[in-house]
């Protein structure tokens, strides 16, 4: 019950800030975003983007990540990989191109929903007690996503909640005899913090 009340309070505060913006910053084309949860999992995740259109609605950029895979994500991501008490699973590196289109639903405000796409390559390292060798899984990743940019201070700082649909394609393993494997699909909620420069 306390969690519901906390979420409602946070949502109302965010909404208030989002709709009390001044239209001061229209000529800032670069964006840098980080995903704070990645630091908790001994890694990093972030992107750098550049707006190609005058209204800053269409952006392209680069995305990178490396972090431990948390226990609550593993069952939806892998087959035959245990929890952190018995095994290690790490996203060794992801490198990707990305594109995002902000939908100007609220024309008077900078805060608006958007659709995006991330496409690239990544690898995972898996260590389990029943095997002496580390297993490497490599894959191409295709990730359409939706989100909402909520702007604050002079439309420079923003919070960016997202829902990503991650699809894995062209999966390869360093040892075909082992049972661990990536699943085909992962639904991944995420929050990033950004600055527009």
Image: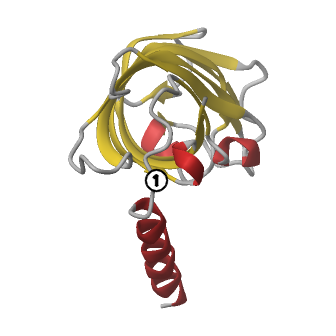
Residue displayed at 63% across by 16% down: 136
In percent of the image, x 43 and y 76: which residue is there? 12
Tell me the residue at 50%/14% (across/down).
Answer: 96
In this rendering, the answer to whether 64 lies above or below 4 is above
Depth order, front residue of 82/34: 34
For the residue pair 20 and 101, the one nearer the viewer reads as: 20
Dot 1 alpha-carbon crowd within 10 angstroms: few under 14, some 14 to 19, many 20 or more: some
Q: Is residue 22 visible?
A: yes
Q: Position of residue 158 (x, y in %)?
A: 54, 47
State the colouring used for the structure image.
Answer: secondary structure
Depth check: give the residue in front, 23 or 167: 23
**Quadrant in the picture for residue 165:** top left
On the rendered image, what quadrant is the C terminus found in? top right
Give the residue at the far bottom of this rendering: 1
Query: Residue 8's x, y, as percent?
Result: 43, 80
Judged left or right of residue 130, residue 3 is: left
Q: Is residue 143 visible?
A: no
Looking at the image, residue 168 lies above or below residue 11: above
Q: Is residue 185 left or right of residue 48?
A: left
Q: Nearer the viewer, residue 124 or 53?
A: 53
Instruction: Residue 68: give x, y in percent of width and height.
Output: 69, 37
Determine which quarter of the picture holds residue 90: top right
Q: Secondary structure at mark 1?
A: loop
Q: Which residue is mark 1?
A: 22
Q: Quick one: which residue is furthest to the left in this view? A: 105
Give percent across and percent down for residue 131.
72, 26
Query: Count of labels shown?
Result: 1
The residue lying at 35 percent from left, 20 percent from top is: 54
């Amino acid at each position: 019950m306390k969690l519901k009340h906390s979420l409602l309070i946070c949502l109302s505060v965010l909404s208030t800030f989002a709709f009390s913006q001044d239209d001061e910053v229209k000529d800032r084309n670069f964006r840098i975003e980080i995903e704070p949860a990645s630091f908790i999992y001994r890694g990093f995740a972030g992107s750098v983007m550049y707006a190609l259109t005058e209204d800053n609605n269409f952006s392209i950029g680069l995305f990178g990540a490396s972090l431990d895979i948390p226990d609550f994500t593993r069952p939806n991501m892998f087959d035959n990989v245990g929890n952190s008490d018995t095994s290690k699973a790490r996203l060794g590196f992801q490198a990707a191109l990305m594109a995002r289109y902000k939908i100007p639903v609220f024309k008077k405000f900078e805060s608006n929903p958007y659709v995006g796409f991330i496409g690239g390559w990544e690898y995972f390292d898996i260590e389990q007690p029943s095997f002496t060798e580390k297993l490497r899984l490599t894959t191409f990743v295709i990730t359409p996503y939706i989100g909402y940019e909520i702007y604050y201070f002079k439309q420079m700082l923003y919070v960016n909640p997202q829902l990503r649909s991650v699809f894995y394609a062209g999966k390869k393993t360093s040892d075909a005899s082992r049972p661990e494997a990536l699943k085909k699909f992962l639904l991944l909620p995420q929050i990033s913090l950004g600055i527009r420069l």
